[in-house]
Image: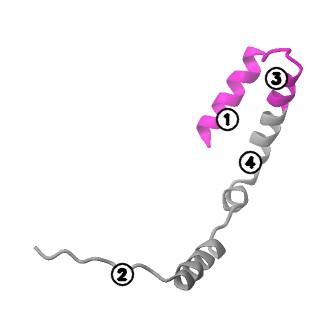
Amino acid sequence: MVRQTNKPKTVSEAKQSLRIASNNIDYFGAIRRNPFKSTASAFVTGVLWGRLKKNAGLPPGLLEIALQLIKRM
């Protein structure tokens, strides 16, 4: 069995492939595909974060809604 070894890329080739790969990344793709879910999850996360910062604890109903929302995404 013959094993093929790949020749390592030069620094300039590696930089070029990294630039091409980074241009193809769409960070907001999930938000564009699901704008309502994204907005709702951001809102719930903000509410939960605000409640946690006040040390008031989380109401059980709000926590359950947040978990259901996360499961559906």
* Quarter-of-image position of residue 29: bottom right
Give the labeled residue for mark 1: 69
Name the one closer to the observer, 19 or 64. 19
Give the labeled residue for mark 3: 52
State the mark number for residue 38: 4
Q: Position of residue 17 (x, y in %)?
A: 55, 79
Could you tell me how far apart the alpha carbons at marks 3 and 1 are, in whole angstroms? 18 Å
Reading the chain from its start, which is encountered first: label 4 or label 2? 2
* Quarter-of-image position of residue 31: bottom right
**Which type of secondary structure does the marked residue at label 1 adopt?**
helix
Magenta residues: mostly which secondary structure? helix
Residues at discs 3 and 1 in contact (Cβ within 8 Å): no
Could you tell me how far apart the alpha carbons at marks 4 and 1 are, in whole angstroms? 10 Å
* Quarter-of-image position of residue 52: top right
Residues at discs 4 and 2 in contact (Cβ within 8 Å): no
* Residue depicted at x 69% and y 62%: 27
Question: What crowding class fits label 4: few (fewer than 14 Cα within 10 Å), some (14-19), or many (20 or more)?
Answer: some
- Locate the C terminus and report the quarter of the image it occupies: top right
Q: Is residue 12 above or below residue 46?
A: below
Q: Position of residue 23 (x, y in %)?
A: 65, 75
Q: Position of residue 32 (x, y in %)?
A: 72, 60
Could you tell me how far apart the alpha carbons at marks 3 and 2 are, in whole angstroms? 53 Å
State the extent of the magenta-drawn residues as a range: 47-73
**On the picture, is 16 further left or further right than 48?**
left
Mark in front: 3 vs 1: 3
Residues at discs 4 and 1 in contact (Cβ within 8 Å): no
Q: Is residue 33 above or below residue 14?
A: above
Could you tell me how far apart the alpha carbons at marks 2 and 1 are, in whole angstroms? 47 Å
Question: What crowding class fits label 2: few (fewer than 14 Cα within 10 Å), some (14-19), or many (20 or more)?
Answer: few
Question: What crowding class fits label 1: few (fewer than 14 Cα within 10 Å), some (14-19), or many (20 or more)?
Answer: some
Q: Amino acid at mark 3?
A: Leu
* Residue depicted at x 80% and y 28%: 48
